[in-house]
Amino acid sequence: MQFSDWVRRWNHQQRGYRPYKDLSMEVMADLVAAQCRGRPLRILDVAAGLGVLSHSMKTRFPGAHLTGIDIDPVLLHIARETFGHEAVFLEGDLRQPDWADPLDPPYDVIMTASALHWLEPRHVERIYHDAYHLLAPGGLLLNSDHMRTALDVPLRPTFEEAIAIAQGRIKSNPGYETWERWWDALSKEALIKPLLVERARRFGDVEDVDQELPPEWHLDAMKQAGFRDAAIAFHWYHEAVVAAVR
């Protein structure tokens, strides 16, 4: 099997859920370039999955030292096979207080995308607190995720319709597959089947949270964790990039 093909297909199906995903990753890379000013980078990708965000940063900053951490054995396997020796991908459960034990700080950048909305707010608060201590002084924390605008915004119906139009445009492309179809196709790969069993064991008792806290909540949590500066870098209704500097 060609692991790079599965990454490509993952990217395509994710755009059907997050039409502005590519733009948000460009914003994150631009922030890294501006804050870190070309110095050698040590980047930590939290909830890295199969390494989509890491790949974006590696393309932009080829000399960066990349580390990813995740709990999903299937996605970690794909990431390791895809990157080879160009990045390190470790196992860690973000719901646990010791999730960061395998890491080797300090880092210049800690980033995460499309992940923390699956966690309870208390877990996100702890991750921000841990990130503060894992970063070098002047280090950058970035989170790109679902962060919904307040529900009483008058233009809410227009925003929702615009997002539906963007999603429909992507999903109407020939060959588009949903999240469920991607996993179903992957499950037919013989090399992946044992990892799917382990994945089911790890996630069997995990309750879906899927909270979309507003970006202002994240800024407050970052400041409470100790970050001296925190701001919204990009926002479109229910998608945002928030940034903070240690």
Image (cartoon, rainbow, N blue to C red):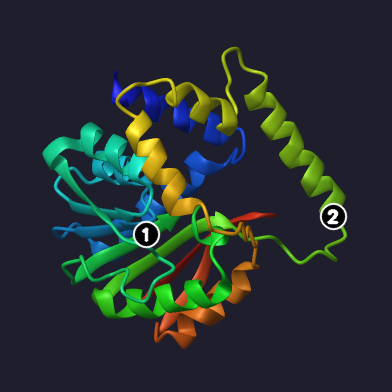
Residue beneath the point at 18% across and 58% down: 41
**Quadrant location of the N terminus?**
top left
Residue 116, percent from left and from top: 50, 61
Q: Is residue 237 above or below residue 219?
A: above
Q: Nearer the viewer, residue 235 or 168?
A: 168
Q: Is residue 150 left or right of residue 135?
A: right
Q: In the shown orientation, is residue 166 left or right of residue 143?
A: right
**How far apart, in angstroms, are the residues tagged by discs 2 and 1?**
30 Å
Task: Tell me residue 192's x, y (percent).
Answer: 34, 29
Which residue is under mark 2? 155
Amino acid type of the residue that numbered disc 1 sits on in the rendered structure:
Met
The amino acid type, in three-letter code, at marker 2 is: Leu
Q: Which is closer to the viewer, label 2 or label 1? A: 1
Q: Is residue 221 above or below residue 201?
A: below
Instruction: Please report whichever mark, 2 or 1, sits nearer to the chain's N-terminal start.
Output: 1
Label 2 residue SS: loop
Residue 23 visible from this viewpoint: yes
Note whether 215 is above or below 118 in the view shown: below
Which residue in the protein does label 1 denote? 111
Query: Which of the numbered marks, if any, corresponds to residue 42?
Result: none
Q: Residue at x 41, y 73 (%)?
A: 127
Say which residue appears at 19% left-offset and 57% top-offset.
Answer: 38
Residue 150 picture location, percent across and down:
76, 67
163 left or right, relative to 195: right
Tell me whether circle 2 and circle 1 mark residues in contact (CB < 8 Å): no
- What crowding class fits label 2: few (fewer than 14 Cα within 10 Å), some (14-19), or many (20 or more)? few
Q: Quadrant of the C terminus?
A: bottom left
Q: Quadrant of residue 191?
A: top left
Where in the figure is residue 102, as x and y percent of width and height? 20, 65
Give the residue at the far top of this rendering: 174
Q: Secondary structure at mark 1?
A: strand
- Which quarter of the picture shows residue 225? bottom left
